Image (spheres, grey):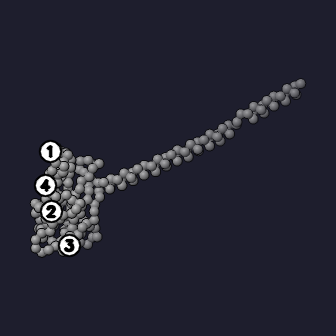
Amino acid sequence: MPQKTKTKKTIAKKTKTKNNPTPMNLRRKDMRFKISLVILIGMLTFSSLLLLLSLNKSSATTLDSEAAITSPAKNISGIKKSGSKELNDNTLDFKLTVPVQLGEWLYKTGEVKSLTDDFISNQYLRIFIPLSGAKSNNFDDQNKNILTIRRFSADEWSDVEKDCEGDKKDICGAAGTLIAQSDEWAYAYTKPTDCLKSIAAKCDLAGKIIESFTLK
C-alpha cells in the first residue's frame, strides 16, 4: 500500500510539472515578445521618419516654387549708341527706360519670399551690369546689381510702413523706397551702397531708370 501511494504522488507530480511551463519557457516567451515589440517599434519609427522626410521635401519644394523662383538672366546686348533702351518684359506689369550710357546690362525677374508673411511672395526685377576682369564663374561675382524693384500687395506694404515706424528697421531697409502705388499693388526700389569707384557712374544711372518707371 505505501508503494502504491508513492506511485500516485509521483504521477501527480509529473502531471503538475507537465501542465505548468518552466521558468525557462516563460523567459523564452517573454524574450520573443520583447524582440517582436522592439522590431515593431523600429518599423513604426522608420515609417514615421520616411513620412516626415517626404512631407519636408514636399514643403521645401512648394516653398521654393512659390517663394524663390528666379528666371535665368536675360542678356540685353547690342544696345544702340544713341537713344535709350526700353525694358518691357511680359512678366512685369511695368516698364522702364534704360539710359544708353549704361552700356551692356542684364536683368532677372522672379519671386522672392515676402518680408512680412512667409506664405506669400513678391515679384521682383533686378538689373545688373557686367564687371570687367571677374575671375569667378559665379553670376553675382561677374555682375553687379545696380537696381532692384519689388512689388508688394497694398496690404503688405501697409504692414511694412507700420514696421518702419516701429523697431523693425531691417524690414524697412529691405523693402526700399516707394516708387508707385495703386489700389492693389505697391512698388519699391533698393540700390546698392557698395558700388566700386570704377562703376560708380553706372550705378548712379539707377536714379534715371527709376524716374522712367511706368505702369502698363
Which labelled disc corresponds to residue 165?
Answer: 1
Frontmost of labels 2 and 1 is 2
Of badges 4 and 2, the one in the foreground is 2
Give the alpha-carbon distance from disc 3 to disc 1, as whole Å.
42 Å
Give me the disc on residue 179: 4
Residue located at (70% from left, 37% from top)? 22
Q: Earlier in the sequence, mark 3 or mark 1?
A: 3
Please give the count of numbered marks on the rendered protein: 4
| Marks 3/2: CA–CA distance | 16 Å
Q: From where the camera sits, is residue 173 visible?
A: no
Q: Which residue is mark 2?
A: 96
- In the picture shown, does residue 40 fall above or below 132? above
- First of labels 2, 1 by sequence position: 2
Image spot of residue 37 (x, y percent): 56, 42
- Measured from the top left, where is residue 52 in percent x and y? 42, 49
- First in sequence: mark 3 or mark 4? 3
Q: According to the image, label 3 marks what residue?
A: 77
For the point 24% across and 67% down, the residue is 74
**Is residue 72 placed above or below 112 in the rendered structure?**
below
**Percent position of residue 186, x then y:** 17, 51
* Disc 4 element: strand
